[in-house]
Amino acid sequence: MPLDNHREAFIPYPRKDIIKLCLADGRLDKESAEAFQSFCEILTAFYHFQFHSTLETIKENYRVFDPNAEVQPLYEPSLSDYEQMGKTVIQTFEHTLEQANYYPVTESTIHQALNNRSLINLKTDVDFSDFEQLLCYYRGDIDQSITVKKLFFWKAEQTVDILERLVLLIQFKGEGHFQAKEKQNKRKRNKGERQFTPGKMYVYFYKNIPKLDMDLLFPNVQTSMTLRDQMMLAVPAIGAAIPVLLKALPNILILVAAILLTLNAGSALDSIDVEEEQARNIMPVLVATLTFVIALGGFAVKQYSQYKNKKIKFQKDVTDTLFFKNLANNAGVFQMLVDIAEEEECKEIILVYYHLLTSPKPLSPQELDANIEAWITEKTGAVINFDIHGPLQNLQRLRGFTGSVKTEKSLLEYDDQGCCHVLTLQEATEVLDYLWDNAFRYNGHVL
């Protein structure tokens, strides 16, 4: 989905609230409502088990890439194992993000952020050649009006493109890449200067990030002042330097005269309008030197203080972006996203099953999709772009035995016209119960 399309598949309500909406819809009698609640309960338990397995897969393979790992493996993986573990993390995490209804941020959007500024007025540069892997996903693309300070007391309203949730995964290249890079740049960098560890994966989860400021989230970003800010420091500095130099000019001339006498060039004193006796007197020379040094030093300290204050302000702006909008880092991101994906999958399946169960006529996937979107809008006011294909595939994959004859059935099947049909609540619950009972097949097996 493109970033400028604001209709997304994300359902902005908790799973339990969606179930309550279905029950309050009035299409189920009391007995069916109780059976529907049982269906939702066992469905949720089954998918919780499934996503727990997904999380364990990510955790097991991410451990060697985790920069904050508290435990170390007893057995170091081989190079081929290491590469495969990295691929497993990336593939599983991408699939989880898609299940959570997140969308990839295009490379052009990231480079657009580098070339433009939104709220934080800084020049930025990111060396993408440092990365072995780069994933960037988002959910929620909205326009938000923000009051921005322009000059002095003047404030203005500015419309900013905000990404409500942003996930960033970066794997840095190995130590050899950075050693070669430093050698090429003829600069030896202390390892302690780096804000990252080569070869590790860094995962970040943020909220409400201006799209054009996402470049500040990269751990290897280099920031500098814009030309406008440099001019705002340089022009007043030049203006303030002129009076200082004019005031110190007589003392400077005395210093020059003293230097000329030392070099046996006294004949040049007439050209600078300084008497020889004044230049030979050591006290005026010392006073002139001290006055000049104090004036120059005071001016330098003042300008440096202004530069430092400006730099601290920029650092605070960046800190506000990174710290106050950060939701999770590294391993914590996987846990949060897996939980979100589990919720989304369950909500979608419940909505599809409910609408097929209560529909007075068979529905095609397109008709079902339109019915669910209209129903969500009618009940909540939210406008979504429901992802119909995912939950239909999930319902088809849920197969098990039901009935006294123990016939294997799928929760969803298609007729010859391509319309969808689901099992009754009794049969659907029996299939889920069968799947739950057979999640582990230890009973009756020799271990």
Image: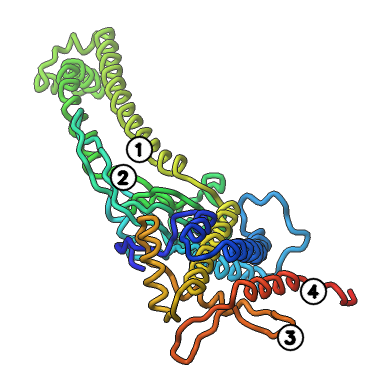
Q: Which residue is mark 3?
A: 405
**Secondary element at image label 2:** loop
Q: Which residue is mark 2?
A: 122
Looking at the image, tell me whether mark 4 or mark 1 is earlier in sequence order. Answer: 1
What distance separates the C-alpha of mark 4 from that of mark 3?
Answer: 21 Å
Looking at the image, tell me whether mark 3 or mark 1 is earlier in sequence order. Answer: 1
Question: Where residue 405 sits: x, y (%)?
Answer: 74, 85
**Secondary element at image label 4:** loop
Which color scheme does this rendered protein use?
A: rainbow
Q: Residue at x 66, y 58 (%)?
A: 63
**Secondary element at image label 3:** loop
Q: Nearer the viewer, mark 3 or mark 1?
A: 3
Looking at the image, tell me whether mark 2 or mark 3 is earlier in sequence order. Answer: 2
- Asked whether disc 2 touches disc 1, contact meaning CB atoms under 8 Å apart, the reply is yes
Q: Residue at x 45, y 40 (%)?
A: 324
State how many labels appear: 4
Q: Which residue is mark 1?
A: 314
Residue count near mark 4 (Cα–Cα under 10 Å), binned few <14, some 14–19, many ≥20: few
Q: Which residue is mark 4?
A: 441
Viewer-side residue, 149 vs 12: 12
What distance separates the C-alpha of mark 2 from that of mark 4?
Answer: 59 Å
